[in-house]
Image (spheres, rainbow, N blue to C red):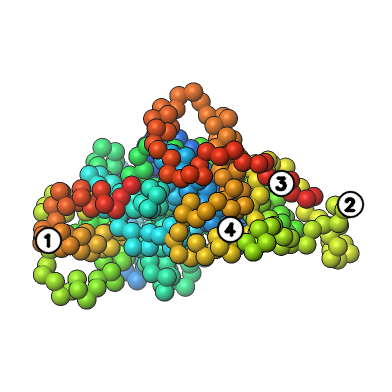
C-alpha cells in the first residue's frame, strides 16, 4: 500500500507506527514536500493479514540481507525487547515441556554464546529447545549450557 | 496524478521487499537439496503420510540423505510415525538442526512441538475470523521453517502435504517450480476423481508431476500371504462401476505414470502408530511394493536430473541401512480401469 499527497503529487513517507491497540495499528505518514501528516488506522483483519505475511511494519525497515539469522529475527521482532509493532501479539514462551524434575532441579546457566545460538532459531521452537537442552546438560552432569553442550546435543539428536 | 506503479517503494515499510527477501533466503537454504518432492493427493485419508515415511525409509536404506517436512501443520502425523515426538531441535551456529529418526532421516513435524491433546493455534488480532488469514499465516510458518532449518546437503526433501486439491496447488505455488509432485490415490472412484482434479490443477503450472501411487491396492493378509480385494473392482467393460447409480460417470483416467501399487497391511498401520520402520521387519509383499515404488521414484527423479549433481554422488557412498535395499523388484500392477 502506498500513499500519495495529492496537492504535491508526492509519495508520502512512513513516520511512526503506534503499538497495537485491540488489533489496530496507527501508522502515520507524512508528505516530504508540504509536511502534511495522515494516519492509517487498520482494522483487526488488515492487521492480521499483514502479520500473517511474517513481515515487519515500521519506518525504514532495514534490509535483512547479510544481517545473519539472529539479526534478522531481532529485526522481525522475534526476540525480547523488539520494537516490532506485532511483538505484543506473538505468544509468550510457555513451559509445557517442563517436567516436575526440571522444575525441582537447580537452574541451568547459559553462556552468552549459547544464548546467541538459541536466539537464532524460530521463536516457536525456542521454549522446547531450551528445556530439552537443559535436561540434556543435567544428564551429562553440568549446570551450564555452552557451545560444547549444544554441539553434543546436535550430534546426539540432530541430523 | 501519480499512479501506484509510478512510485518506487512503499514509503518505508518494504513489505514486498521483505517477502522477496524471505523467498531468497528459502532458496539459499535449499540450495544443497537435490530433489524437492511433495507427496500430495487432494484426497484425505489415502495414506500420504504413511507412503512419505516409508518411501523415505526405502530411499534412506539406499544410502541417500533424506528429510521430511510434515507440511500438514494442523494434523501432523510424522512425529509419531517417525518416532520423533520427543525429538529435540538444537540450535546450530546459524540455524536449527533437524531431529533425526533412528535410521537417520531428518524430520520436521509440528507434532514434535505441539502435544496431540492440543491444536495448533496462532495469536491473532482477528480472533473468530481465521478464514480470512489462517492460510496466509500457515504459509508464513512454512517459510519460516524452510529458512531457519539446517537442511544441508540432501538428496531428497519430501513434503508431506495436507489434504485438499486447492492446498496442493497452493503448495506448488509457494514451493516453486523446483518441487516435483507425487500423488497418492486409492482404488476408489471418489479418490481418483479428486486426484484427477489435483492433476488438472497442477498441470496448469510449471511443477513436474512424477506420477501417482495407488495405495490400499488390495488387502495383504499375512495369514494367507496373499493380497485380497479391498475395494470393489469395476466391471469388465470398465465403463461403469457395478454399483454406480444411473447418471454417475467413472472418473477420468489419471494421465500420469503409475509408479506402483501398495496393498493395505494392518501391520504397516501398527508400525506407523509405534514409530517403527518397515525395514525393521522381515520382507513382505508390502515392503517389496514400497521398494518398487521407491526405485521408480528415484529412477523418475534421476531421469531428468542435470549432470551437475555433486551432492548426491557424494552422499551415495553412505552404507545402505537395510538388507531390503538393493533387491530387484517386480513391476507394480496396473490399475484396473
- Can residue B190 be seen here? The reply is no
Q: Which residue is mark 2?
A: B237
Dot 1 falls on a residue whose secondary structure is loop
The tally of labels here is 4
Question: Residues at badges 4 and 2 in contact (C-beta under 8 Å)?
Answer: no
Q: Residue at x 31, y 66 (%)?
A: A91
State which chain disc 3 sits on.
B
Dot 3 falls on a residue whose secondary structure is loop
State which chain disc 1 sits on.
A
Q: Which residue is mark 4?
A: B47
State which chain disc 4 sits on.
B
Query: Is B296 left or right of B66, judged from the image as shown?
Result: right
Tell if the residue under mark 4 belongs to the same chain as the one under mark 2.
Answer: yes
Q: Which residue is mark 1?
A: A141
Position above or below: B17 against B217:
above
Badge 4: residue crowd in 10 Å (few <14, some 14–19, many ≥20): some
Question: Residues at badges 2 and 3 in contact (C-beta under 8 Å)?
Answer: no
State which chain disc 2 sits on.
B
The tag earlier along the polypeptide, 2 or 3, is 2
Position above or below: B205 against B266:
above
Q: Which residue is mark 3?
A: B333
Query: Is A51 left or right of A143, judged from the image as shown?
Result: right
The tag earlier along the polypeptide, 4 or 2, is 4
Badge 3: residue crowd in 10 Å (few <14, some 14–19, many ≥20): some
The residues tagged by marks 4 and 3 sit, at their Cα atoms, a distance apart of: 18 Å
Tell if the residue under mark 2 belongs to the same chain as the one under mark 3.
Answer: yes
Amino acid at each position: 500500500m502506498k500513499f500519495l499527497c495529492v496537492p504535491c503529487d508526492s509519495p508520502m513517507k512512513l513516520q511512526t507506527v503506534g503499538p497495537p491497540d485491540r488489533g489496530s495499528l496507527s501508522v502515520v505518514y507524512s508528505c516530504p514536500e508540504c509536511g502534511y501528516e495522515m494516519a492509517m488506522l487498520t482494522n483487526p483483519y488488515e492487521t492480521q493479514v499483514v502479520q500473517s505475511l511474517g513481515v515487519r511494519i515500521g519506518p525504514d525497515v532495514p534490509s535483512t540481507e547479510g544481517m545473519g539469522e539472529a539479526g534478522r529475527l531481532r529485526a522481525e521482532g522475534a526476540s525480547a525487547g523488539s520494537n516490532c509493532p506485532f511483538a505484543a501479539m506473538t505468544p509468550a514462551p510457555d513451559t509445557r515441556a517442563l517436567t516436575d524434575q526440571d522444575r525441582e532441579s537447580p537452574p541451568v546457566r547459559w553462556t552468552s554464546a549459547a544464548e546467541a545460538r538459541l536466539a537464532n532459531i524460530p521463536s516457536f521452537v525456542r521454549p522446547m529447545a531450551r528445556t530439552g537442552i537443559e535436561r540434556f546438560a543435567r544428564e551429562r552432569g553440568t549446570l551450564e549450557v555452552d557451545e560444547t553442550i549444544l554441539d553434543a546435543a546436535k550430534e546426539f539428536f540432530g541430523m | 496524478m501519480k499512479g501506484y506503479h509510478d512510485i518506487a517503494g512503499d514509503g518505508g515499510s518494504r513489505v514486498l521487499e521483505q517477502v522477496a527477501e524471505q523467498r531468497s533466503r528459502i532458496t539459499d537454504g535449499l540450495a544443497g537439496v537435490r530433489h524437492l518432492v511433495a507427496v500430495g493427493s487432494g484426497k484425505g485419508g489415502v495414506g500420504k503420510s504413511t507412503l512419505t515415511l516409508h518411501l523415505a525409509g526405502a530411499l534412506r536404506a539406499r544410502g541417500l540423505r533424506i528429510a521430511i517436512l510434515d507440511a500438514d501443520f494442523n494434523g501432523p502425523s510424522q512425529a509419531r510415525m517417525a518416532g520423533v515426538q520427543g525429538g529435540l531441535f538444537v540450535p546450530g551456529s546459524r540455524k536449527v538442526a533437524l531431529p533425526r529418526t533412528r535410521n537417520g532421516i531428518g524430520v520436521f513435524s509440528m507434532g514434535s512441538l505441539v502435544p496431540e491433546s492440543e491444536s495448533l493455534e496462532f495469536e491473532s488480532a482477528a480472533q473468530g475470523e481465521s478464514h480470512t488469514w489462517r492460510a496466509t499465516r500457515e504459509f508464513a510458518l512454512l517459510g519460516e521453517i524452510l529458512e531457519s532449518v539446517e537442511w544441508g546437503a540432501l538428496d531428497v526433501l519430501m513434503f508431506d502435504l495436507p489434504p485438499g486439491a486447492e492446498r496442493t496447488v497452493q503448495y506448488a505455488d509457494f514451493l516453486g517450480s523446483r518441487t516435483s509432485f507425487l500423488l497418492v490415490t486409492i482404488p476408489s472412484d471418489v479418490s481418483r476423481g479428486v486426484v484427477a482434479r489435483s492433476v488438472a490443477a497442477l498441470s496448469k503450472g510449471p511443477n513436474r508431476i512424477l506420477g501417482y501411487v495407488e495405495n490400499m491396492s488390495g488387502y495383504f493378509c499375512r495369514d494367507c500371504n496373499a493380497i485380497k480385494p479391498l475395494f470393489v473392482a469395476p466391471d469388465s467393460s470398465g465403463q461403469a462401476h457395478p454399483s454406480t447409480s444411473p447418471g454417475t460417470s467413472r472418473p477420468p483416467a489419471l494421465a500420469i505414470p503409475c509408479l506402483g501399487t501398495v496393498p493395505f497391511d494392518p501391520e504397516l498401520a501398527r508400525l506407523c502408530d509405534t514409530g517403527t520402520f518397515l525395514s525393521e521387519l522381515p520382507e513382505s509383499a508390502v515392503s517389496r511394493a514400497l521398494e518398487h515404488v521407491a526405485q521408480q521414484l528415484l529412477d523418475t527423479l534421476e531421469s531428468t536430473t542435470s549432470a551437475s549433481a555433486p551432492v548426491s554422488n557424494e552422499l551415495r557412498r553412505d552404507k545402505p541401512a537395510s538388507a531390503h535395499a538393493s533387491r530387484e523388484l517386480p513391476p507394480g500392477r496396473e490399475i484396473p480401469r
